[in-house]
Image: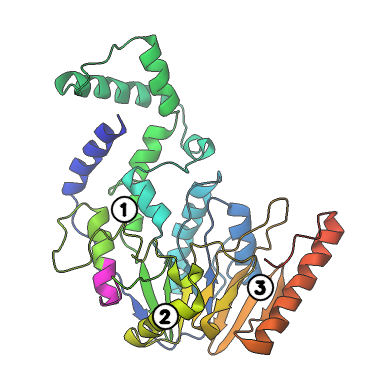
Amino acid sequence: MTRVFAGLLAVLAVSLAAPAQAQSAWDHVARVVVIGDLHGDYGKFHDQLIQAGLINGRDAWSGGATHLVQLGDVPDRAPDTRKILDLLIKLEPQARRAGGYVHALIGNHEAMNMEGDLRYTTPAEFAAFVDRDSAARRDAYYARVVDALKANPPAAGVPTFDEAFRAKFDAEHPLGWVEHRAAWSPNGVYGRWVLTHNAVIRIDDALYLHGGIGPEFASFDIDVLNKAVISALRHDPQDAAGPQDILWNEQGPLWYRGMAMNDEATEAAHVAAVLTRYKVRRIVLGHTKRYSMVNARFDGGVILTDIAVPGGCLDPHGFLIKEGDTLTAVHRGHRLTLGLSGAAHDAYLAEIAALDRAVALGAGLAPTCTVK
């Protein structure tokens, strides 16, 4: 049944003019703040913005010429996706007027929401769209679904439209579902906004994206990758010479985990090739929750910002600040020099462990709430 509604949205999208290709590279940026996956946690995002000096007490941009890079995966898993998106949309023009920038990159969960894959969308995310007319909207959608099933019966035959069928329909389409799907459609408030953004950007000597770039995709220019993502989200015909199945391919920029998970000895040659190919020193990623802090791999060639929080432990609200060659990790409100390798990396992990132990002790949590 959800495919019926997706089809209606696709028809509406055809009438849209294609948005202009977003800029994908910047040079001479003094300060970059990088925030990984948020998954509906508005409180964490707001705290990170405050700690980074990017918003004031009125939640207005105060970051001047700073570039904020949010690495995708704003939606799903927690209730406040809509609040995060609305704040990003509000801050974007404010930052531009101040000489800064808000880069809201496209992650796999942005693509999933636009494509109707709602496996991780929570009831509260649908509820955030409920208003006095939601029941009437759902009734109207139900009527359209019934009409569509009658006009184009499935292989098993036309269903019996009884109370059980309607109860199942309502369970699968809670109040707010129709509005959520409309908002994430290519012409909806959030879907249309996503289509004005990139999946991959370069700022000075660093590449920023959600998942990573696998060997199948490393030959393509950044603009080609971004164009392919946007075209796929708009359901445009796929370019035979371009990246294939970019929204779902596990080697694509929304999904690849090799740079985060593969053994460094086996992945090092590929990482080095990507750094050379895009003329950067670092690749900064979200997507993969491997460590309980912002952490570096490949002697700083890859930096991971999606933080794994052990069960029963407190989220450190960690993020990355890049100022020229200086890399700082903010962890539990403390600013630490991010050691990239060797003794400097060991010292960094020791500082993280000390902070985690102190917080765990003060909160009466298990001593296992530390470096992972």
Give the mark nearer the N terminus: 1 vs 3: 1
Circle 2 residues within 10 Å: few <14, some 14–19, many ≥20: many
Q: Residue at x 47, y 53 (%)?
A: 86
- Locate residue 201 relative to residue 9 in the image: left or right: right
Q: Does residue 318 lie above or below 170 as drawn?
A: below
Can you see residue 58? no
Task: Judge depth for marks 1 and 3 and give the one in front.
Answer: 3
Q: Label 1, secondary structure: give it.
A: helix
Q: Residue at x 28, y 70 (%)?
A: 216
Q: Residue at x 74, y 65 (%)?
A: 370
The type of residue carrying mark 1 is: Arg
Give the mark nearer the N terminus: 2 vs 1: 1
Q: Which residue is mark 2?
A: 271
**In x, y percent, where is residue 232?**
24, 56
How many angstroms separate mark 2 from mark 1 (CA)? 33 Å
**Which span of residues is magenta-colored?**
217-226
Q: Which residue is mark 1?
A: 192
- Locate residue 125 relative to residue 308 in the image: left or right: left
How many angstroms separate mark 1 from mark 3 (CA)? 32 Å
